[in-house]
Image: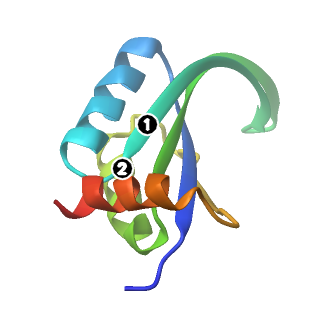
């Protein structure tokens, strides 16, 4: 299976829900690794400028796994219109990418 590393970002409303999603994504082998960090988001929603404290999840997985990861995120997500963005990486340290695949496939 030809693939390359991929990163997916999403946001959650608070640390508790972010940690729950991160654990479930890794435990269910939807992501190899998930990092979380608090952020402040500025965006327009329903014609109003919003400033919101959120928690960003940075999910890592092989690119062939993007549909599985997206379905899992959408199933757990509380937002009406969740951010689910995928970024293909140019490459990765080969042993790290091997580890990423083993986390998903084993």
In this picture the colour scheme is: rainbow
In the depicted structure, whether residue 20 falls above or below residue 73: above
* Residue at the spot 54% in from the left edge and 41% down from the top edge: 10
Task: State left or right for residue 40 relative to residue 103.
Answer: right
Query: What residue is disc 1 on?
Result: 34
Quadrant where the N terminus is found in the figure: bottom left
Quadrant where the C terminus is found in the figure: bottom left
For the question of whether residue 84 can be seen, the reply is no
Q: Residue 31 carries which label?
A: 2
For the question of whether residue 59 can be seen, the reply is yes
Q: Where is residue 66 in the image (x, y as percent from the top left)?
A: 44, 66
Q: Position of residue 33 (x, y in %)?
A: 40, 41
Task: State left or right for residue 12 relative to residue 22.
Answer: right
Report how far apart the C-alphas of labels 2 and 1 lie in the structure.
7 Å
Element marked by disc 2: loop
* Residue at the spot 49% in from the left edge and 30% down from the top edge: 35
Q: Which of 6 and 56 is in front in this view?
A: 6
Task: State left or right for residue 52 relative to residue 58.
Answer: right
Task: State left or right for residue 42 relative to residue 95.
Answer: right
* Residue at the spot 72% in from the left edge and 38% down from the top edge: 46
Disc 2 crowd rating (10 Å Cα; few below 14, some 14-19, many 20+) is many
Q: Where is residue 3 in the image (x, y as percent from the top left)?
A: 48, 77
Q: Which mark is residue 8?
A: none
* Residue at the spot 48% in from the left edge and 69% down from the top edge: 63
Residue furthest out toward the front: 95
Element marked by disc 1: strand
Disc 1 crowd rating (10 Å Cα; few below 14, some 14-19, many 20+) is many
Q: Where is residue 44 in the image (x, y as percent from the top left)?
A: 80, 36
Q: Determine contact: label 2, label 1, CB under 8 Å.
A: yes
Q: Which of 55 and 99 is in front in this view?
A: 99
């Amino acid at each position: 299976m030809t693939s390359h590393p991929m990163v997916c970002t999403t946001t959650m409303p608070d640390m508790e829900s972010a940690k729950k999603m991160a654990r479930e994504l890794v435990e269910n082998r939807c992501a190899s690794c998930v990092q979380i960090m608090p952020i402040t988001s500025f965006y327009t929603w329903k014609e109003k400028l919003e400033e919101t404290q959120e928690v960003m999840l940075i999910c890592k997985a092989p690119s062939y796994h993007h549909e599985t990861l997206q379905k899992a995120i959408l199933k757990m997500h509380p937002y009406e219109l969740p951010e689910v963005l995928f970024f293909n990486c140019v490459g990765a340290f080969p042993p790290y990418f091997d580890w990423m695949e083993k986390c998903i496939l084993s």
